[in-house]
Image (tube, rainbow, N blue to C red):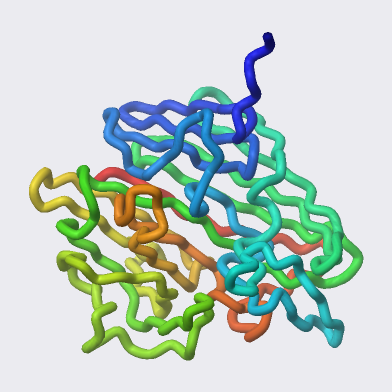
């Protein structure tokens, strides 16, 4: 009997120094990432499907589109409701598609995909996501080019769940370098951004998560001189640290404390996004990608 095909397709393993990562054919998904054997993300087994978005690429929009309906250039579009219980189109169109994987040595793999026009998104995009391991951990570069004949609305996100230490996240310290946050309704759709100061969402300085529940978009990121914003998860007992950084292309950050995981609150999703939830409806920070034009964004994870 032939061996069963893994649900996430072929697997590519990368190694560099103390770091190792696995990227899958289905969804160009980051299935595992470790440093000296310690998990930096909550991954999943090779014989499992990705669940709750773990490690997936989110495009041509991240997060949600209310009712799956949006207007662009005076035309209305209806996306399939991939989150039917909430009546939303969620996390884009490429999470379950097979990508082509091309390695460059044992440190780097590039996943590529041609997204063709379809009902709800009648636009064409050539997509490449390059995962590279080095001394600074994992670096992920996403490049998207409009290969169609008309402008296209575009947004991008990634969905890693960060891990530091073992057990649930209540005892971990979190730093989120943002000045503003959006409350969300029971469909995960955001209200207007407001300052984090004085709210339970103020993690500008490291503090314990405790029982705080978060599934919110943050913005007005605080950056270093290189333009990077860095979120930090730290275990004060083991002093293990996991950091996620993002370049200026990412103006938003979704933080989710993992209540929906099989082991609730086992990790914290820290999701770099170029635009907020429901951006195709609101127009906030949606990229208007002209024919032939490209957009790039870079983020990464490292052990602190």
- 75 left or right of 154? right
Q: Is residue 105 above or below residue 225?
A: above
- Quadrant of residue 87 within the rendered picture: bottom right
Quadrant in the picture for the N terminus = top right
Compared to residue 304, the image places residue 155 above or below, namely below
- Residue 202 location, quadrant: bottom left
How many labels, in total? 0
Looking at the picture, tell me which residue is in the foreground, 213 or 172. Answer: 213
The percent coordinates of residue 54 (x first, y second) are: 48, 49
Whether 215 is drawn above or below 265: the answer is below
The residue closer to the viewer here, 69 or 135, is 69
Where residue 163 sits in the image (x, y, percent)?
A: 30, 47
Left or right: where 168 falls relative to 119: left
Q: Is residue 291 visible?
A: no
Q: Residue at x 30, y 56 (%)?
A: 265
Report x, y in % for residue 286.
64, 76
In this rendering, does residue 218 appear at all? Answer: yes
Q: Residue at x 24, y 73 (%)?
A: 203
Residue at point 61%, 78% (across, down)? 279
Q: Residue furthest right?
A: 149
Residue 285: quarter of image:
bottom right
**Residue positioned most to the top:** 1
Q: Is residue 65 left or right of residue 247?
A: right
Give the residue displayed 53% in from the left and 29% down from the top: 47
In the rendered image, residue 40, in percent from the top left (x then y), is placed at 33, 42
State the residue lying farthest toward the front: 85
């Amino acid at each position: 009997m032939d061996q069963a095909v893994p649900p996430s397709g072929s697997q590519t393993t990368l190694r560099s120094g103390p770091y190792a990562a696995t990227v899958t054919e289905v969804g160009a998904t980051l299935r595992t990432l470790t440093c000296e054997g310690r998990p930096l993300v909550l991954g999943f087994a090779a014989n499992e499907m990705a669940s709750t978005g773990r490690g997936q690429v989110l495009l041509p929009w991240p997060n949600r589109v209310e009712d799956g309906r949006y207007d662009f250039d005076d035309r209305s579009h209806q996306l399939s409701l991939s989150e039917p219980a909430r009546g939303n189109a969620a996390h884009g169109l490429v999470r379950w598609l097979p990508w082509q994987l091309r390695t460059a040595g044992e440190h780097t793999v590039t996943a590529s995909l041609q997204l063709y026009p379809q009902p709800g998104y009648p636009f064409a995009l050539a997509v490449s996501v390059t995962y590279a391991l080095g001394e600074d951990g994992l670096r992920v570069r996403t490049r998207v080019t409009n290969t169609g004949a008309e402008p296209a609305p575009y947004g991008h996100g990634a969905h890693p769940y960060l891990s530091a230490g073992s057990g649930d996240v209540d005892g971990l310290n979190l730093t989120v370098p943002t000045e503003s946050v959006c409350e969300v309704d029971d469909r995960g759709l955001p209200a207007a951004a407001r300052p984090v100061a004085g709210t339970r969402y103020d993690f500008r300085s490291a503090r314990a998560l405790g029982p705080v529940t978060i599934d919110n978009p943050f913005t007005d990121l605080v950056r270093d001189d290189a333009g990077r914003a860095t979120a930090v998860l730290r275990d004060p007992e083991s002093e293990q640290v996991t950091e996620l950084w993002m370049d200026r292309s990412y103006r938003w950050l979704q933080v989710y404390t993992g209540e929906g995981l099989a082991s609730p609150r086992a990790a914290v999703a820290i999701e770099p996004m170029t635009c907020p939830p429901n951006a195709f409806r609101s127009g906030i920070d949606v990229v208007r990608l002209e024919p032939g034009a490209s957009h790039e964004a870079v983020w990464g994870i490292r052990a602190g």
